């Protein structure tokens, strides 16, 4: 049954991604999707799989998160969607 959960998760992820693409540009959405996914996989592997992450890697994860925040904050996509 775990494979059913994976399929449901993928379907939900792509449905939500399609909804977001209605209000944001593909480039911004992809940057957020890729950066957040990379950071979350690294954190989950450290917390649940016992992988050891050294401080330079944690710094890189923090920079990824900061980059995602900056892209979202300065993309301006939300403003046009709210006005139009």
Image (cartoon, grey):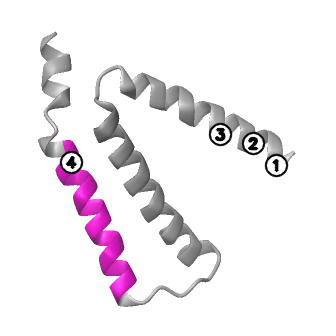
Q: CA distance from mark 3 to mark 4?
A: 26 Å
Q: Which residue is mark 3?
A: 9
* Left or right: where 2 falls relative to 30: right
Q: CA distance from mark 1 to mark 2?
A: 5 Å
Is there CB contact under 8 Å for labels 3 and 1? no
Q: Which residue is mark 4?
A: 71
The residue furthest right is 1
Residue 56: % across, % down: 34, 86
Residue 7: % across, % down: 73, 38
Is there CB contact under 8 Å for labels 1 and 2? yes
The residue furthest front is 27
Of mark 4 and mark 1, the one earlier in the sequence is 1
Q: Which residue is mark 1?
A: 2
Residue 5 tag number: 2
The residue stretch that appears in magenta:
56-72
Q: CA distance from mark 4 to mark 2?
A: 31 Å
Which residue sits at x=65%, y=76%?
Answer: 49
Q: CA distance from mark 4 to mark 1?
A: 34 Å
- Residue 44 colored magenta? no
Residue 62: % across, % down: 29, 70
Which residue sits at x=30%, y=61%?
Answer: 65
- Residue 70 colored magenta? yes
Image quadrant in which you'd find residue 47: bottom right
Secondary structure of the residue carrying numbered label 1:
helix
Residue 4: % across, % down: 80, 39
Q: Is residue 13 above or below residue 82?
A: below
Q: Residues within 10 Å of mark 4 (few under 14, many from 20)?
A: some
* Left or right: where 76 falls relative to 72: left
Which residue sits at x=34%, y=33%?
Answer: 26
Is there CB contact under 8 Å for labels 4 and 2? no
């Amino acid at each position: 049954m775990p494979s059913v959960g994976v399929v449901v998760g993928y379907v939900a992820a792509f449905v939500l991604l399609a909804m977001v693409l209605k209000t944001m540009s593909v480039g911004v959405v992809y940057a957020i999707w890729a950066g957040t996914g990379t950071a979350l996989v690294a954190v989950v592997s450290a917390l649940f799989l016992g992988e050891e992450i050294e401080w330079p890697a944690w710094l890189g994860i923090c920079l990824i998160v900061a980059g995602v925040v900056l892209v979202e904050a300065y993309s301006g996509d939300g403003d046009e969607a709210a006005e139009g």
